[in-house]
Image (cartoon, grey):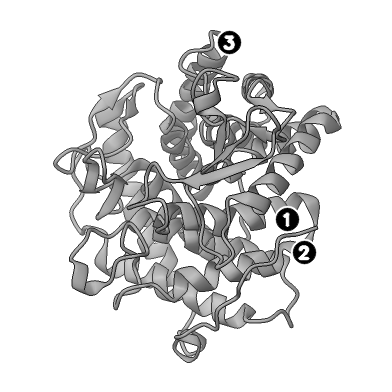
Amino acid sequence: MIRQVNIEPIDLRQDFLETPPITRDEAIAAFEACVKQVEANMDYFQDKFPWSATKELKYPIIENIEWTDGFWTGMLWLCYEYTGDEKFRALAERNVDSFLHRVENKIELDHHDLGFLYSLSCVSGYQLTGSEKAKRAAILAADQLLTRWQEKGQFLQAWGPFNSPEHYRFIIDCMLNIPLLYRVSQITGDPHYAEIAQKHFETSCKYVIRDDASAFHTFYMNPETGGPDHGATRQGYNDDSAWARGQAWGIYGIPLNVRYTHQLEYADLYRGMTNYFLNRLPEDHVCYWDLIFTDADKQPRDSSAAAIAVCGMMEMDRQLPEDAADKAVYRGAAANILRALIKGYTSETCEPGSPILYHGVYSWHSGKGVDEGNIWGDYFYMEALMRCIKDWHPYW
């Protein structure tokens, strides 16, 4: 049975209905500014990768070891799709070589973030070029992700030593990792990958989303019984608050899974999560890093969460029938938020090592990437613009 949650009425319903759509010309102008920054960063990173977030608004350069490295390669593929310029393809293909080496040697892959790494780098590479290297890397990555599967609890364990009781949990972020399994199921013809993806998705929807349609960041299962134990946070303000990026992972994760399963019964869960998010936006409609905050709290925004949510609303727009409840409202909300990002969260200057999208938060508790750019924010902003430019085939 699909979880039932509260669906709040949308406070700014009329405002969103009256929001004009992002025009193709608006999106092209914004995307071409992104292309210029990517070009500058290609010279800056060369064959290496940006760290997850900027430090003093410049990306540190790292080897291919982080969970976020696929976002940079995804940006290269977006630029290649848009421009047709072989320089983007050439660097993206060298990145694919790096990702194949990483998965063949299992370098820093003992976690669940294989989708973030390999959907945007290698599934995309195979989709756009037919590369056998990219195909092999994607399949090996899916196989690696399956090593995190906990049959007893029906979930993919997020982090930590496998079967360690203190790490017997999953997180809402993994909704964006499991599309890798659906894709590899299609590529190989093996239904097992998709079956695991769907089971994890069902477990997530059952437990990580609260009755009020907000989300825990992480949910612990009982290692003895495999049943639910408790929800908690690692990134949000506290265990009972709604971490903005986690909420956005749900807003995007549900439609991505629906695209593969065709289970539109999950639309109400999506509506609940999306309405909760929209009702807690500040005046400029770009969320604070936790939805518990208001304009009076003077907390940092998380522009990356806003961009993720926009992609989720755009993806669900494809799945919902034209007469679906609030479909036009979500279209207006997505346009409203994306226009706010274009106008207030980017820079007119272009410097090597700089982000595309400013005012993001990686981890407030650890002080990493607070009011900085982050590489997934850059990627999702570009993806949202690409969706406005053409009928785009997602890499997820």
* First in residue order: circle 3 vs circle 1: 3
Q: Which residue is mark 1?
A: 258
Horizontally, residue 63 falls left or right of residue 55, namely: right
- Contact (Cβ within 8 Å) of mark 3 with mark 1: no
Residue depicted at x 54% and y 45%: 230
- As drawn, which residue projects farthest toward the front? 224
User: In the visual, does 267 lie left or right of 329?
Assistant: right
Please state which amino acid type lies under the numbered disc 1: Val
Foreground tag (3 vs 1): 1
Residue identified by numbered label 2: 264
Question: Residue 119's quadrant in the figure?
Answer: top right
| Mark found first going from the N terminus, 3 or 2 | 3
Towards the viewer: 84 or 118: 118
The answer to whether any part of residue 24 appears in the image is: no
* 206 left or right, relative to 52: right
For the point 46% across and 17% down, the residue is 108
SS label for mark 1: helix
In percent of the image, x 74 and y 83: which residue is there? 323
The correct choice, above or below, for 137 with respect to 34 in the image is above
Q: Name the residue type under label 2.
A: Leu
* Secondary element at image label 2: helix
Residue designated by label 3: 104
Other residues around mark 2 within 10 Å, as few (<14) / some (14–19) / many (≥20): some
Q: Residue furthest left?
A: 56
